[in-house]
């Protein structure tokens, strides 16, 4: 589809509401205003007008807003019609607009895509629009707004600018080969490079926080039947999300709860008790449990404290530990402390965290909540943060890798050409975040996930 087309879409959610908004952007927006409103409204003023059908009869009446390009969200001529929020009324008005030649329904995210293509916002800001809409907590919403206002982009652009200055200095050394050794060994380049690496590390730390706010952490509760997994899910969720009985194998399918711990999203997954099952339904549930475990950020290994005194996971159930994915973090949760009399709290055992609690009474559950927050490095006191996506983290990691390789070339071989190439690649990785270097396929994937009308 051409970006020269004029596009229209409903900007408010489907269904009934007090107000329904249609947004039009493109060269034909002016024609839409003349046909539907009978006039071109004064720019950036609210005009209360009837919305007319082809025969001149009124379809609705409401507020019209006219934003001539380039001073609009998309950078094109934009018309907004704010009428009543009934689906029938909006559908009639939409059909009326689509009778005009050169006007079509917008693709998901196409308004934001045009804003990006017309340099009204960069790619990180465009993504922040969708993140702000999808925010599941106040902290996530504030961070998404910071990204939309350019906080993340400013940090990235500062790094790109620093790399540009460094590349100029390095390439000057290459252009004057008689002076190259002096240029590369005088310590100035190394100091500047170390400064960029330190700044990048700080941005990566904030980006990981932002990714946690957006993506959350996937935690799977796993263990033998009747260890108290469903009780722990209920305790963490603060409600009776799962059925709890003394019958082994009560939970046969995966149960999911979405909660927040001081603003950090947490996806808690309760799974079927792991054992050799003869029942076909239970066996399917166990297979699904292992699928969830393999995709988890952390596993809560639930242990019935009344059945064993062991605290090392390898001693408690060696076959289970052996099957876990390599490097998957484990927290051993010794349950039923209200019965065993074990002291509540957290400790370390052979590199694994051990939490003693009672899922039934809720004692010690707050300790587990704090542990989950700290294990992901989540800082509730971080101010002025921004949201980040997985692709942002990947781009930052690639940039950091190129800088480290460049530093090795500088210190190990005084190889100016190789250092310059690593700096260029690092700069390119960072520029992918804001969209300066981005493939069309990636743009399509990003904007297709947006709401229609955004």
Image (cartoon, rainbow, N blue to C red):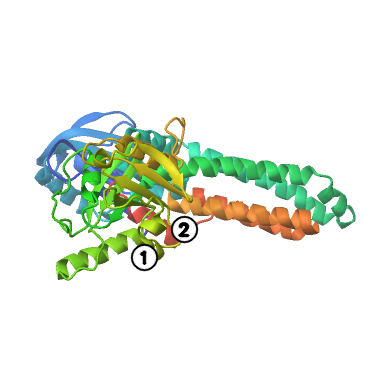
Dot 1 or dot 2, earlier in sequence: 1
Mark 1 nearby-residue class (10 Å; few <14, some 14–19, many ≥20): few
Q: Residue at x 50, y 57 (%)?
A: 438
Q: Position of residue 136 (x, y in %)?
A: 30, 40
Q: Is residue 387 visible in the rendered structure shown here?
A: no
Q: Position of residue 203 (x, y in %)?
A: 54, 41
Dot 1 and dot 2 residues touching (CB under 8 Å): no
Tell me where residue 275 sits by quadrant: bottom left
Query: Foreground residue, 61 or 183?
Result: 183
Q: Residue at x 76, y 47 (%)?
A: 169
Q: Position of residue 444 (x, y in %)?
A: 39, 58
- Image quadrant holding the N terminus, namely bottom left
Query: Foreground residue, 439 or 210?
Result: 210
From the viewer's perspective, tell me whether residue 73 is left or right of residue 154: left
How many angstroms separate mark 1 from mark 2 (CA)? 16 Å
Q: Residue at x 24, y 68 (%)?
A: 276
Mark 2 nearby-residue class (10 Å; few <14, some 14–19, many ≥20): few
Q: Position of residue 432 (x, y in %)?
A: 52, 53
Q: Is residue 169 above or below residue 445?
A: above
Query: Foreground residue, 62 or 199?
Result: 199
From the viewer's perspective, tell me whether residue 119 is left or right of residue 415: left
Q: Residue at x 54, y 50 (%)?
A: 396
Residue holding disc 1: 319
Q: Which mark is residue 327?
A: 2
Q: Secondary structure at mark 2?
A: loop
Q: Is residue 208 visible in the rendered structure shown here?
A: yes
Query: Foreground residue, 311 or 151?
Result: 311
Instruction: Tally the numbered discs.
Output: 2
């Amino acid at each position: 589809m051409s970006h020269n087309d004029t596009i229209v879409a409903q900007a408010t959610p489907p269904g009934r509401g007090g107000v329904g908004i249609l947004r039009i952007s493109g060269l034909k927006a002016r024609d839409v205003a003349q046909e539907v409103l009978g006039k071109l409204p004064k720019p950036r003023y609210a005009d209360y007008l009837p919305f007319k059908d082809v025969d001149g009869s009124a379809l609705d009446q409401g507020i019209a807003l006219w934003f001539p390009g380039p001073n609009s969200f998309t950078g094109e001529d934009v018309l907004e019609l704010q009428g009543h929020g009934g689906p029938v009324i909006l559908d009639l008005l939409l059909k009326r607009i689509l009778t005009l030649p050169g006007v079509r329904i917008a693709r998901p995210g196409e308004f934001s895509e045009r804003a990006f293509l017309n340099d009204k916002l960069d790619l990180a800001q465009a993504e922040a629009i969708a993140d702000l809409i999808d925010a599941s907590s106040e902290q996530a919403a504030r961070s998404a707004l910071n990204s939309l206002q350019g906080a993340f982009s400013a940090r990235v652009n500062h790094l790109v600018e620093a790399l540009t200055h460094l590349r100029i200095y390095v390439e000057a050394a290459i252009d004057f080969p008689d002076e190259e050794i002096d240029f590369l060994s005088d310590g100035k380049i190394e100091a500047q490079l170390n400064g960029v690496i330190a700044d990048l590390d700080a941005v990566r730390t904030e980006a990981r926080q932002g990714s946690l706010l957006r993506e959350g952490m996937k935690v799977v509760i796993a263990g033998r039947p009747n260890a108290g997994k469903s009780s722990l899910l209920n305790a963490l969720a603060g409600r009776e999300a799962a059925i709890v009985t003394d019958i082994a194998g009560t939970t046969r399918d995966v149960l999911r709860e979405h909660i927040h711990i001081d603003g950090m999203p947490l996806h808690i997954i309760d799974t079927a008790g792991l054992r050799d099952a003869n029942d076909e339904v239970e066996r399917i549930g166990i297979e699904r449990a292992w699928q969830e475990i393999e995709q988890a950020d952390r596993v809560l290994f639930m242990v019935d404290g009344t059945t064993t005194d062991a605290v090392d996971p390898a001693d408690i159930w060696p076959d289970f530990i052996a099957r876990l994915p390599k490097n998957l973090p484990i927290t051993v949760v010794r349950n039923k402390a209200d019965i065993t009399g074990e002291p509540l709290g957290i400790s370390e055992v052979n590199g694994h965290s051990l939490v003693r609690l009672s899922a039934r009474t809720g004692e010690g559950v707050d300790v587990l909540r704090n542990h989950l927050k700290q294990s992901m490095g989540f800082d509730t006191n971080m101010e002025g943060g921004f949201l980040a996506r997985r692709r942002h983290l990947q781009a930052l990691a690639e940039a950091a890798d190129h800088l480290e390789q460049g530093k090795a070339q500088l210190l190990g071989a005084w190889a100016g050409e190789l250092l310059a190439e690593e700096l260029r690649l690092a700069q390119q990785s960072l520029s992918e975040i804001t969209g300066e270097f981005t493939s069309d396929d990636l743009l399509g994937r990003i904007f297709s996930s947006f709401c229609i009308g955004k």
